[in-house]
């Protein structure tokens, strides 16, 4: 399976600021997704990153708060905007294809003070 | 009701034990099914796909019952290295994956 490089691996940010997380895949992938994982909980899908067009957001997530880019089939970014302590979480990007199998980046642990 | 529900656990078993995890899903239109493993502070990794005919990979056996909307994972001869959280994942035909909350397994010497 493909390998995703995700960075940063962790960051501590001040409230009101923004952080952009990057994911680079070592091969082209059909689909890329962004997830959030709160401590002790499972993964919640934020959005599907669509190549060359606006991302598809899940209920409870909006573009103004979590703008996503996917300029090509190997790269995507997620920005967490105007951060508050409630945004403290692990953010994970993933890639997949028609099989439905997913592979993940190593995650970004975000702490907002 | 959650779309994917798993045994809450945790499961604490001795080495060599057999342990089974259960999972149910609510969307009858779900297309594909998987078990993932997540180690502490790591990303999830695909463990195995799940098919109606059942599939086995070494000590791991997965089974799907579409009529009951039920998925299982059986681990035989547990090893210390099997300690992890096991996530049940269900996909719709839109390609969206829904994760269960996970079941934590601790295998003790």
Image (cartoon, grey):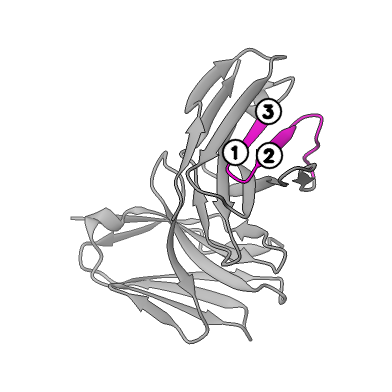
Closer to the camera: disc 3 or disc 1? 1
Q: Name the residue that disc number 3 marks.
A: A79
Quadrant position of residue A100: bottom right
Relative horizontal placement of residue B6, taking residue A72 as reference (left or right): left
Q: CA distance from mark 1 to mark 2?
A: 6 Å
* Residue A103 placement (x, y as % from top left): 49, 52
Q: Is residue B29 left or right of residue A73?
A: right
Regarding residue B91, the answer to whether it shows in the image is yes
Chain for disc number 1:
A
Which image quarter: residue B19? bottom left
Q: Position of residue B11 (x, y in %)?
A: 38, 59
- The span picked out in magenta is A60-79
Q: Are marks 1 and 2 in contact (CB under 8 Å)?
A: yes
Q: Between disc 1 and disc 2, whose residue precedes?
A: 2
Q: Which mark is residue A70?
A: 2
Chain at numbered mark 3: A
> Can residue A39 be seen in the rendering of this structure?
no
Q: Secondary structure at mark 2?
A: strand
In magenta stretch: residue A74: yes
> Percent position (x, y) of residue A91?
58, 36
């Amino acid at each position: 399976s493909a390998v995703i490089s995700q960075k940063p691996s962790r960051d501590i940010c001040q409230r009101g600021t923004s952080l952009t997380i990057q994911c680079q895949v070592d091969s082209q992938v059909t689909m890329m997704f962004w997830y959030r994982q709160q401590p002790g909980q499972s993964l919640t899908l934020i959005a599907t990153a669509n190549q060359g067009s606006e991302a598809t957001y899940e209920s409870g997530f909006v573009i103004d708060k979590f703008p996503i880019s996917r300029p090509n089939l190997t790269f995507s970014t997620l920005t967490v905007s105007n951060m508050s302590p409630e945004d403290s979480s692990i953010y994970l990007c993933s890639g997949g294809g028609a099989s439905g199998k997913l592979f993940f980046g190593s995650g970004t642990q975000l702490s907002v003070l | 009701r959650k779309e994917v529900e798993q045994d809450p656990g945790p499961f604490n078993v001795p080495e060599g034990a057999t342990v089974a995890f259960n999972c149910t899903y609510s969307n009858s239109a779900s297309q594909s099914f998987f078990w993932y493993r997540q180690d502490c502070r790591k990303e999830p990794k695909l463990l195995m796909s799940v098919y109606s005919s059942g599939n086995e990979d070494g000590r791991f056996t997965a089974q799907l019952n579409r009529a009951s909307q039920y998925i299982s994972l059986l681990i035989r001869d547990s090893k210390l290295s099997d300690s992890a959280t096991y996530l049940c994942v269900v996909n719709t035909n839109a390609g969206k994956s829904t994760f269960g909350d996970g079941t934590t397994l601790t295998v003790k010497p």
